[in-house]
Image: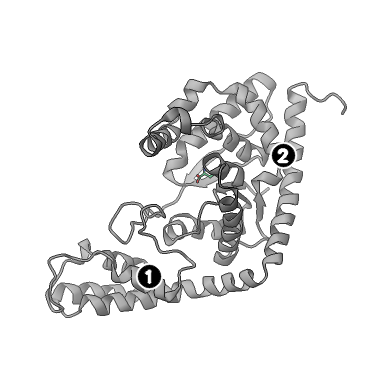
């Protein structure tokens, strides 16, 4: 039996190359070896965007297209929409008794997010909803509904997986051994830095290159990337290790990297030419992804169909799990 891999992504924006190298490239490989579920977590996205349903709906399609374009294959893996699986919501209700409020507030990821909300809105009372504080419970339902065993996530998600494990142990202790304790699987690729040298790449930081960016947009972004400030003239020698252009060459330029490095140190390569070379290489890597994107943008009905079929398949599994859960909880009245 193949192990079950499950991961979720909030539909709040397009995938950028930080996502791609940090996580999604790995998902493409996993689908060959494991029974994979990829959840578009629209219900979770609403915990932060409940007043902006258009944004979530738009990004469900954008994310689905991104996933298909990078090579997630619906005949190998199940791509599904969280909101179409009511069993997840029902499991969330049952699990909510197994988690205390203080434990939720102590979750480091939730804690950080509450601090960010406070900084943004000033008033915790107005911005921290019941749905938001409880999203780790709903995420435990996402995972257990499909008996997810291996959960490929970034480091920031470890507290959520740990909280899920606690819920599973508590459930199994009280009601009997039904649920599987999932394990987080961290990637080997460290977080990709932004073009501005920031440790994190993100939409809000304005330092990301998106998989769907056009050559013009990529050119503008790379031309503004941070280089060695000591290099003033084209033939000044420079230190590639403090240059973001070199950092990106290491991701995109294959065999050319050694020459980039030595010429930069020797002062035989100007920054503009170096950036142009990087732009070409980024576009080369993104080209096949963007060709697929174009296809799916022109065949949006096909995307809807893939989501519908994936969700149907996912629902069968979630429904079987819920049945077992309710039986264990003595809620199987009419079976
Ligand atoms: N919380 C995750 C994030 O923000 C998304 C997510 C939702 C998820 N459900 C999940 C991740 C289940 C792993 C497993 O990135």
Spatial separation of the CA atoms under disc 1 and disc 2: 42 Å
Is 213 above or below relative to 310?
below
Q: Nearer the viewer, residue 221 or 78?
A: 221
Residue 269 location (% of width, % of height): 20, 79
In which quarter of the view is residue 318 placed? top right
Residue 209 in sight here = yes
Q: Is residue 196 above or below residue 130?
A: below
Query: Tag 2, which secondary structure?
Result: helix
> Which residue is situated farthest in the top direction here?
174
Q: Name the foreground residue: 264 vs 225.
A: 225
* Residue 61 sits above or below residue 135 on the image: below
230 vs 44, left or right, is left
Whether residue 259 is visible here, answered yes or no, is no
How many residues crowd around disc 1 within 10 Å: few (fewer than 14), some, or many (20 or more)?
many
Residue pictured at 88% horizontal, 26% vertical? 334
N-term-proximal mark, 1 vs 2? 2
Q: Quadrant of ligand 1?
A: top right
Kindly identify the residue that appears in the image at 41 percent across and 52 percent down. Answer: 188
> Are the residues flagged by discs 1 and 2 in contact, CB closer than 8 Å?
no
Circle on res. 142: none
Secondary structure of residue under mark 1: helix
Q: How is the image coloured?
A: one colour
- Splitting the image into 4 quarters, where does residue 189 fall? bottom left
Q: State left or right for residue 70 relative to residue 270.
A: right
Could you say where residue 235 lies in the image, as x and y percent from the top left? 13, 79
Nearest-to-viewer mark from 1 and 2: 2
Q: Quadrant of the C terminus?
A: top right
Q: Position of residue 95 (x, y in %)?
A: 63, 27
The residue sitting at the right extreme is 334
The residue beneath circle 2 is 86
What residue did someone put label 1 on?
252
């Amino acid at each position: 039996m193949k192990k079950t891999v499950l991961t979720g992504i909030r539909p709040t924006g397009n995938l950028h190359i930080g996502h791609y190298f940090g996580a999604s490239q790995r998902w493409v490989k996993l689908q060959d070896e494991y029974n994979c579920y990829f959840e578009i977590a629209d219900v979770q996205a609403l915990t932060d965007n409940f007043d902006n349903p258009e944004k979530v709906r738009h990004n469900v399609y954008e994310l689905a297209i991104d996933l298909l374009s990078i090579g997630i294959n619906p005949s190998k893996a199940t791509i599904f929409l969280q909101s179409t699986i009511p069993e997840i919501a029902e499991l969330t209700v049952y699990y909510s008794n197994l988690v205390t409020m203080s434990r939720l507030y102590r979750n480091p990821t939730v804690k950080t997010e509450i601090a960010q909300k406070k900084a943004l809105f000033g008033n915790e009372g107005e911005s921290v909803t019941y749905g938001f504080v409880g999203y780790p419970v709903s995420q435990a339902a996402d995972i257990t509904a499909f008996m997810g065993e291996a959960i490929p996530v970034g480091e920031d998600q470890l507290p959520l997986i740990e909280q899920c494990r606690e819920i599973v142990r508590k459930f199994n202790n009280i009601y009997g051994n039904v649920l599987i304790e999932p394990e987080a699987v961290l990637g080997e690729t460290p977080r990709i830095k932004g073009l501005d040298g920031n440790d994190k790449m993100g939409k809000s930081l304005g330092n990301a290159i998106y998989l769907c960016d056009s050559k013009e947009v990529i050119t503008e972004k790379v031309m503004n990337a941070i280089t060695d400030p000591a290099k003033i003239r084209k033939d000044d020698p420079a230190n590639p290790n403090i240059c973001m252009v070199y950092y990106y060459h290491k991701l995109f330029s294959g065999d050319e990297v050694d020459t980039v490095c030595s010429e930069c140190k020797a002062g035989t390569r100007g920054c503009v030419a170096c950036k142009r070379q990087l732009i070409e290489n980024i576009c080369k890597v993104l080209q096949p992804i963007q060709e697929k994107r174009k296809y799916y943008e022109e065949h949006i009905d096909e995307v809807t169909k893939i989501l519908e079929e994936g969700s149907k398949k996912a629902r069968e599994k979630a429904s079987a799990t819920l049945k077992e859960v309710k039986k264990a909880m003595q809620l199987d009245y009419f079976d």
